[in-house]
Amino acid sequence: MIKTQSIHCPNCGDRATRHFTDNSIIRTSCRSCDYLLVQCAKTGKVIEAYAPGIDSSSLVASASA
């Protein structure tokens, strides 16, 4: 059984959906900005991610500052 939850997108703030599946996978997606995050519900590890507009080099630079 898949449970669905409506949330605010962490990327753009618009409406996004979060799907919880029986096989411990959480899939969060946003139609407005094409955000996608697939992760394991048990471990929290990211399986797949896509967030347009977020530059990974800026995340590394701000984390080391």
Image (cartoon, grey):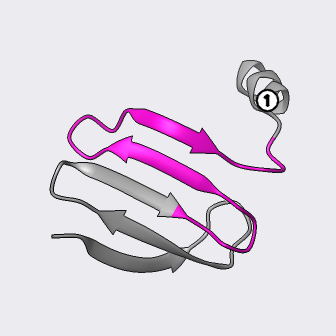
- For the point 83% across and 25% down, the residue is 57
Magenta stretch, residue numbers: 29-54
The crowd level at tag 1 (other Cα within 10 Å; few <14, some 14-19, many 20+) is: few
- Quadrant the C terminus occupies: top right
Vertical relation: 8 (above or below) 42? below
Q: Is residue 60 left or right of residue 8?
A: right
Q: Which residue type carries mark 1?
A: Ser
Q: Is residue 34 magenta?
A: yes
Label 1: which secondary element: helix
Residue under label 1, please give it. 62
Q: Position of residue 38 (x, y in %)?
A: 44, 47
- Split into 4 quadrants, where in the image is the N terminus? bottom left
> Percent x, y for residue 2?
23, 70
**Position of residue 6 in the picture relative to residue 44 (left or right):** right
Residue 45, located in which quarter of the rendered image?
Answer: top left
Identify the residue at image location x=52%, y=49%: 37
